[in-house]
Image (tube, rainbow, N blue to C red):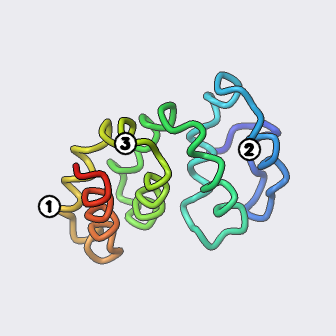
Amino acid sequence: MFECSPLVPKDKFDTSSIAALQAVEILEVQPILGDLLAWIRDINWPVAQPLMEVLPRFHRELVPHIKAVFESDDDVWKCWTLSLLESFPRDTVELLASAIRRMAEFPTPGEVEEEACVYAQRIVDVFKL
């Protein structure tokens, strides 16, 4: 699952790469963006919150990885990914609008149970999607 890169946390307590991620070039981090996004699956992990602050730097490059999260059955991960979108520019969020509106308007039972539909509706409202 996780790429062998010094920029990818080795475990949920490893925040040592966060400072480097703030300065790295996009091309350097592009191959590991999916691995980095995976570390926000549980916002209670110590590494998750610092990543929530640095990942918006790569907003456009994260779009295909976010689409994969939205197509998954990991409804908790959808919630934290939707929260991450609050720090993205509108034009990037618009690239994900159809999936976000679907979660807000026609959520799966799991999205209702984990309240991903509530997070999605907040994004719809904030960005007027």
- Amino acid type at image mark 3: Arg
Marks 2,1: beta carbons within 8 A: no
The amino acid type of the residue labelled 2 equals: Val
The residue carrying mark 3 is: 90
Residue appearing at x 65%, y 27% in the figure: 26
- Dot 3 or dot 1, earlier in sequence: 3
| Mark number displayed over residue 8 | 2
Q: Where is residue 100 in the image (x, y as percent from the top left)?
A: 27, 52
Residue at x 42% of width, y 34% of height = 64
- Residue 11 lies, in percent from the top left, at 76, 58
Residue 66 as seen in the image, left or right of residue 127: right
Q: What residue type is labelled 1?
A: Phe
Where does residue 47 sit, x and y in percent of width and height?
71, 61
Residue matched to label 1: 106
Measure the C-alpha gap from mark 3 to mark 1: 22 Å
Q: How far apart are marks 2 and 1 (CA)?
A: 34 Å
Tag nearer the camera, 2 or 3: 3
SS at badge 3: helix
